[in-house]
Amino acid sequence: MSNVLIIKSKDELNFSSLKRGKIHRLFIHISENALGIPWRVPLIVIKGHEKGKTIGLTAALHGDELNGISTIFKLLEDINPLKLKGNIVLIPISNIPGYLANQRYFLDNVDLNRIMPGQPEGATSQIYAHHFVNKIVKKFDYLLDLHTASHGRVNSLYIRSDIDNEQTRELAYLQKTQIIVNKYDEEGTLRAWANSNNIPAITIEIGNPSVFQHTLINATLEGIKNTLVHLEMLEGEVKDLVTKDVTVCNSSYWIYSKSGGIVDVLPKLTDRINKGQVIAIIYNVFGEVKDKIIANKDGIVIGKNIRPNCEAGTRILHLGVDIKEPIPETIPGHKDFTPV
Ligand SMILES: [Zn+2]
């Protein structure tokens, strides 16, 4: 292993102490566990040979959402710090206890991505969130937060972003995803905190939990490289604008089951759905059809449940609706983007 710098408990991420044109590996002290031993977040800083912007990529803020880890490792292989302007900060594992327990939540079963920016004093998750934001994320100019579906569900490759905001819309349209969903920032998320602190941020949802899906990971990687070119951190041209393949939805919602039983969700990810279509069949334990769930709008399948044993009130299908057609051809307001 190459040298890993261990940052002392009080210290935060500080670029000025790191050499230009090199890759640095650090552990940042965030909080402490019950042995009094630090929770240290591993962090890779690719420090470019010239000044420029700082972009941060956070993965596994939900501890079992792992596709972002591989995305970060592949990006690391592809970036030469001598050809980079600015800094790329890579955090492959943001929620250390969650990752160790292979679970979404922090140690106290709190969702870190609902309590950002945390509190300096209070519950253990609050303290962790506070230092994570203040020692690391605060240093970014841009943030890409990498997630996946949660346990028992699968996702397409999609973006959650406020596309009415010019900066976050640009970030969204630079990615090579299947779907973009217009989402105002949900309170307590890292994305919401960043956007309200002048750090443009989007969430990239990369498929399924607890696995590496290399097709989706590679597509995510292309979008991230597009972003680096667009931000003038790398030389080159923005490639393969998403405009040809992406579906942009003005909103989305989950369809829930009203009854319990054994559920079979019928459509595949990214299938187009028509209003009135049967999207799931619920069987009783004797194999008889008990109920059918019907789509109440036209839309596209963003994510779905794959756990057959479902109580009443289970999330069944995440439907993207109010689809923008035709698909926008350019990133509005950006002079360098020409229509495809
Ligand atoms: Zn997540």
Image: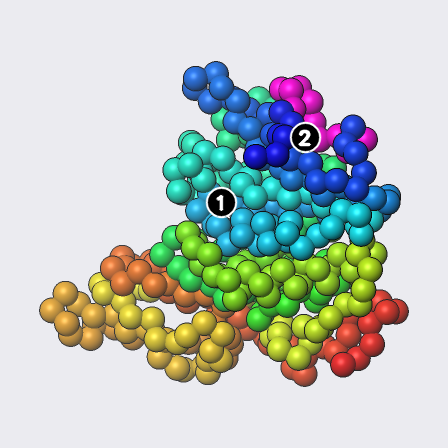
Q: Nearer the viewer, residue 137 or 240?
A: 240
Mark 1 beta carbon near ligand 1 (under 8 Å): yes
Query: Which residue: 60% across, 61% down?
Result: 220
Residue placed farthest to the top in the image? 36
User: What residue span does the magenta drawing correspond to?
Assistant: 7-16
Circle 1 sits in a helix, a strand or a loop, which is it?
Answer: loop
Q: Residue at x 83, y 44 (%)?
A: 49
Q: Is residue 78 left or right of residue 312?
A: right
Residue for point 80% across, 52% down: 83
Task: Indicate the quadrant containing the C terminus: top left, top right, bottom left or bottom right.
Answer: bottom right
The residue tagged 2 is: 135
Residue 165 in the figure: left or right of residue 155? right
Name the amino acid type tagged 1.
His
Q: Nearer the viewer, residue 175 or 308?
A: 175
Which quarter of the figure has residue 46?
Answer: top right
- What is the total number of numbered labels drawn onto the structure image? 2
Q: Residues within 10 Å of mark 1 (few under 14, many from 20)?
A: many
Residue 66, placed above or below residue 306: above
Is any atom of residue 282 visible in this view? yes
Q: Dot 1 corresponds to which residue?
A: 62
